[in-house]
Structures are given as structure tokens and as C-alpha cells.
Amino acid sequence: MEKQIASLHLVSAFLAMEPTDCVLSHARSLGGGSVTVDVQRFVWDHCISKAIGKCHAPYLKNFLKKLILEIESNHDDVLDELYELYTEFMISLKDENAVKGNVRALKYISFLFPDDASCKDAMVRKLVVPLHCSLNMLEGDTGCSIWPASLFLSEFILSIPDMFSSKTCFEVGSGVGLVGICLSHVKASKAILSDGDLSTLSNMKLNLKMNQLSTGDDEPEFSECSDSVKCLHLPWECASESELQGLEPDIILGADVIYDPLCLPHLVRLLSILVDKSEPSLRFPRAGCDSAIGSDRCNSQDVEAARDRAGNASPTKHPIAYISSVIRNANTFDRFLALVDKANLTVADLTGTFQPASLLPYMQSYDRSSIRLFRLSSK
């Protein structure tokens, strides 16, 4: 069983394009401390050979380089196939520099469900989500990157599927579309994804198509990808109150949306309209133009307790918003809290009382401890 888990973690880390040191650590675990010939064969058969022509070539070249150095440093034999492919890359890929510009690659994010979980999704064993995403988080393509808070929000959804099943869910700043794909997986009655950047929205639609959520509508404003998933071009500063009222979500979601002080008034105005069913005149004025399943179990009692802690929403109640975020700047976050209070909204920090199941145990680059989960509701 331990070897099966180690092999699963190794393949999952490779497909997710985790840092090469992370993938190598999984390879050492599979080999009992070193990258044996058997492990090399496994890596070749289940990772490298299947990635040729599909994986981002510079990543694969760098992985091969470090893998060979690891094996040689232990004075072990290297498979001929590894040497031969690396030699081909040495000839075809001359540039050793870091990735430049808005380079995108195909990553596969594997959510691994515990064997002993009793929730329905556990029978799947794993959910693999292919995503076209940016390799440069900080060079003008942030909307097409996979951010930790998005991974956390996805784990949140998959941990408590009953909470989102048969609900209308709306996400602000949907980026690559990962959260929406997870909402579709847990059978949300409708998932409305939005982003203010047309390039990001186009990439999101591509990801939805790769995950069998196809769209025949190429209109940039609003397109339906299936009966349950829709894409909306929604710049926060331009969203009208009537447009937002027409969405009528039960649950609003957002990952890493508390980052720009200039955008916060627009974000809070949007949230206040979505979660508040009171008279329009009482809303925020428009600005400008205990761990629930920390043991990784997901039985019915845990789900019920988690729903109680997280504040399950229903169509007969006020909508509730869940925001996952890394607090990078205390002043920016304080500004967000002040605006939320002015908008007559209540913020509850669920971080200390609720943690979703750890469904990405192989992803060493993903630091859950840095992420906070907030619930916003109308006062």
C-alpha cells in the first residue's frame, strides 16, 4: 500500500509540474531512499514517455537533468532512455534561461480522495483536472495562474459536496476555472464563473472544454458551457446592480481576490449586492463607473458538522460568500474589512475552526497554512 501511495504521489506531482526537487523527493520515497533502476523504469513508463510531445519541453529537460544528476551522484546506473532523451533536448533546446513572457503549459491537478472516505466522490479515488495555465505568476498573466487559494477553495468544495450540490454558485475572479470545474463535479445546479479580463476568460473556456464542459457559444460577454456552468465577462467596476441581482446565487465564492486596494471598493460593492436581498437603497453605494475533516475523512457526520460550521446556504436564506485568501499586505486587508463593515456585511474567519480534507498531499509547493477562509453574510 505504501508503494502504491508513493507511486500515485510521484505521478501526480509530475503531471502537476511540481518543482523538480519535489518530484525527485517522491521518486526517492518510492525507491526507499534512492532512485533505483526500478524507480527509473517506473518514471520512464508512467511519466516521461507519456509526456513527450505533450509536457512543457523546458520543464521536462530540467527534470531529466536533475534526475540524471541525482542518480549519478549515488553512483548508480542511469537508464539509456533517460540519457538519450536528455541528449535530444540538449540539441533542440539551447536556451537555458528561465521562462520568459506569458508562457502557458498544460498541467494536470489530481485531487486524491481517501480510501476510507464514505462520501460519494471517494469512489472515484481521484479527480484529474487538466488546465492550461501560465508559468509566470507575476508577469502580466496572473489570471491564468493556479493560485494556492484556488486550490484551497477547490478542496473546500470537494470535501463537502452536499453543501454545493443543487445550489447556484457564483465565483468572482475565476481565473483558470478550477473552482467551477469542481463545482460541476459535485453537481452544483448552476456554476457561474466570471472574470474581468477577456484573455483570462478565453483561457478559462478552453479549460472548461478540456474538462468536458464544452461551449458552442463564442460570444465574449456571456456563454453557456453546459447546463450547469456559465462564463461571464464581469469587470468589477462596471457590473450593474440589475445584472448582479439577476444572477441570484445561493453561494458566492472567491479565491485571492483581496489584493489590490484600488479594486476593493468595487469588489465589496459587488459582494454586498450578491449577499444582500434587502432594498437597493440600503446597499453599499457604487464606487466609480474545530477542524471539520482534518483527518481527511468525509463521512456523513463530518459533512453535517462541516456544513454547520461553514454556514450552509439555502435559496430561502440570504446568500453567503466564502473567500479564501493569502493575506500578503495587512493594510490592504484592513481596508477590505473597513469597506465590508461599511457595506453592512459580517465577516467570520473560519480558518481556525474549519479545514477541508487534504486532497493534494503530493503537492509540496502548496502551503495550506498560509491560507485563510472567510465567510461573508448580510448583517
Image (cartoon, rainbow, N blue to C red):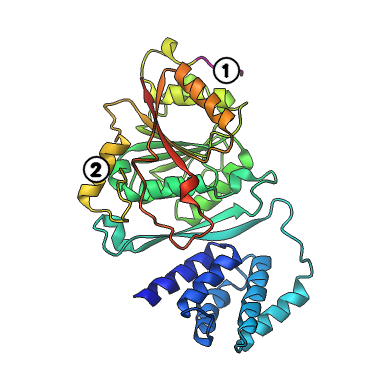
Name the residue furthest left: 301
In the foreground, 359 or 120: 359
Label 1 Cα neighbours within 10 Å, binned few <14 / some 14-19 / many ≥20: some
SS state under label 1: loop
The stretch drawn in magenta includes residue 283 = no
Going 21% across and 50% down the picture, which residue do you hit?
Answer: 300
Would you place residue 358 above or below residue 74 in this image?
above
Instruction: Determine the image quadrant of residue 304.
Output: top left
For disc 2, the marked residue is 305
Foreground tag (2 vs 1): 2
Instruction: Determine the image quadrant of residue 261.
Output: top right
- Residue 270 percent location from the top left of the image: 49, 25
Q: Which residues are magenta?
A: 285-289
Q: Amino acid at mark 2?
A: Ala
Q: Is residue 194 left or right of residue 189?
A: right
Would you place residue 37 above or below residue 251 in this image?
below
**Marks 2 and 1, Cα distance to the nearest angstrom?**
38 Å
Q: Is residue 104 left or right of residue 25?
A: right
For disc 1, the marked residue is 287
Assign the magenta stretch its main secondary structure.
loop
Would you place residue 17 above or below residue 196 in this image?
below
